[in-house]
Image (cartoon, rainbow, N blue to C red):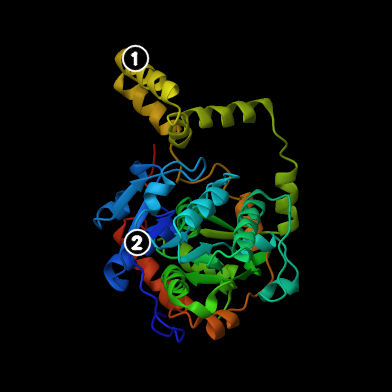
């Protein structure tokens, strides 16, 4: 909820948004433009991913957190930052913090994640005052934890910052939701332990409201807050709510979480899997974007692509382009939940939003029923609830 700040209203000339083309970032840009009336600027690394915010007339500037290029220009005229980007680059946060200090930023809101507490945190992590951050040998958790520690150190050294840790964020465009829908359209959906795990779901608009509140609440400075709904649900409820939007609904099965973990642990990398992964990397548009930052490679790549288009048929060119695109269709073995689902759904802690309500002056406006209804309306509008086309 916005308006329950209770801690003074700061006015910002302009806010720089990193990660503006992502799931949460795009929705934040929409609300900044259409609801909050806050001027903002979007830092964009790949403009081909910016269609959703481009229609808002958003001010977009090029920049790359990984090498710091463009950050000083992007921050010129801005007095606040919302850092949503996740790219895994080890120097991303150092570069952004350093540039923010040079620009004398008045507020730095870092969007972290409950994942900083690891894939299987202890009960001490349900409240901010006792939660711990470590290293877990799990890529996403370790990356988010590393990024938050950098920001924590900067805040301790004087950066006027606030850290938010959203839980499981869902809503229109949510990858968690589209993954379930795509699995359901394949005809089968597998739950872990019958879906008995705890799902700390929070609607995306509530996260955006928390971000806006953190921008303006002086009392929040130097603190970290969980951003979670008032009531947790089971992963069975979360999965089946969206899966049953498909007609006919899928067959639903269950696999023990321990068995699913053992299944993936037994899948050691092979020569074939390494070759396939390398081929996907070579075809990836993100990989090409990174190579293109080197002038000599950019020229060579442009020459190579031009030459290939001359000698290959149009069908072959499209096939190469598709090889680097994310595949949103049914997975090859829908009976086995992927590693990401295992980490998320074999979870048994309820995170509290008490501190955010008490000290940030924020509270969620959407329960799961309301959020799921809005998400369903978007899924229907986007044509994602239509049955998969049969192939013969």
* Quarter of the figure with residue 82: bottom left
Q: Which mark is residue 29?
A: 2
Viewer-side label of 2, 1: 2
Residue drawn at the location 43% of the way across and 71% of the way down: 372
- Quadrant that contains the C terminus: top left
Q: Which mark is residue 223?
A: none
Single out the residue that lies furthest toward the top. Answer: 311
- Please give left or right for residue 14 compared with residue 202 in the image: left
Q: Is residue 248 visible?
A: no
Between residue 124 and residue 380, name the one nearer to us: 124
Residue drawn at the location 42% of the way across and 65% of the way down: 171
Q: Are marks 2 and 1 in contact (CB under 8 Å)?
A: no
- Quadrant that contains the N terminus: bottom left
Q: Secondary structure at mark 2?
A: helix
Q: Residues within 10 Å of mark 2 (few under 14, many from 20)?
A: many
x, y percentage for residue 352? 62, 78
Residue drawn at the location 36% of the way across and 73% of the way down: 11
The answer to which of marks 2 and 1 sits earlier in the sequence is 2
x, y percentage for residue 93? 56, 52
Marker count (numbered): 2
- What residue is pinned by disc 1? 307
Between residue 290 and residue 243, name the one nearer to us: 290
Q: Residues within 10 Å of mark 1 (few under 14, many from 20)?
A: few
- Please give left or right for residue 49 compared with residue 106 in the image: left
Task: For marks 2 and 1, give the CA distance.
Answer: 39 Å
Between residue 204 and residue 319, name the one nearer to us: 204
x, y percentage for residue 21? 39, 52
Between residue 285 and residue 29, name the one nearer to us: 29
x, y percentage for residue 115? 63, 61
* Quarter of the figure with residue 152: bottom right
């Amino acid at each position: 909820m916005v308006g329950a700040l209770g801690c003074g209203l700061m006015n910002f000339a302009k806010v720089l948004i990193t990660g503006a083309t992502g799931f949460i970032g795009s929705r934040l840009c929409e609300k900044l433009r259409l609801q909050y009336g806050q001027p903002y600027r979007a830092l964009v690394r790949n403009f081909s991913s910016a269609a959703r915010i481009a229609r808002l007339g958003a001010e977009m500037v090029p920049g790359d957190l990984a090498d710091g290029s463009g950050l000083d220009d992007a921050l010129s005229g801005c007095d606040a930052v919302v850092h949503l980007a996740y790219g895994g680059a080890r120097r991303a946060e150092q570069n952004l913090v350093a540039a923010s200090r040079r620009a004398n930023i008045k507020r730095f809101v870092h969007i972290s994640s409950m994942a900083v507490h690891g894939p299987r945190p202890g009960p001490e992590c349900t409240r901010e005052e006792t939660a711990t951050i470590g290293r877990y040998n799990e890529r996403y958790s370790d990356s988010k934890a590393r990024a938050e520690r950098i920001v924590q150190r900067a805040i301790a050294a004087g950066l006027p910052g606030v850290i938010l840790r959203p839980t499981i964020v869902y809503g229109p465009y949510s990858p968690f939701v589209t993954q379930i829908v795509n699995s359901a359209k394949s005809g089968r959906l597998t739950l872990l332990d019958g879906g008995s795990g705890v799902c700390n779901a929070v609607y995306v608009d509530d996260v955006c409201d928390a971000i806006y509140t953190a921008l303006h609440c002086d009392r929040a400075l130097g603190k970290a807050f969980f951003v979670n709904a008032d009531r947790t649900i089971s992963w069975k409820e979360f999965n089946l709510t969206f899966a049953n939007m498909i007609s006919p609904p899928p067959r639903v099965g269950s696999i023990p979480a321990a068995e699913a973990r053992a299944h993936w642990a037994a899948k050691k990398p092979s020569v074939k899997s390494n070759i396939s992964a390398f081929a996907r990397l070579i075809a990836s548009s993100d990989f090409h974007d990174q190579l293109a930052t080197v002038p000599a490679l950019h020229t060579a790549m442009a020459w190579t692509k031009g030459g290939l288009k001359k000698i290959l048929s149009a069908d072959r060119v499209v096939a190469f382009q598709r090889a680097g695109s994310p595949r949103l269709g049914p997975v090859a073995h829908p009976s086995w939940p992927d590693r990401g689902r295992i980490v998320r759904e074999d979870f048994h802690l309820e995170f509290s939003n008490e501190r955010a309500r008490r000290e940030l002056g924020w509270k969620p406006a959407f329960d799961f029923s309301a959020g799921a209804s809005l998400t369903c309306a978007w899924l229907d509008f986007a044509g994602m609830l239509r049955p998969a086309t049969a192939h013969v």
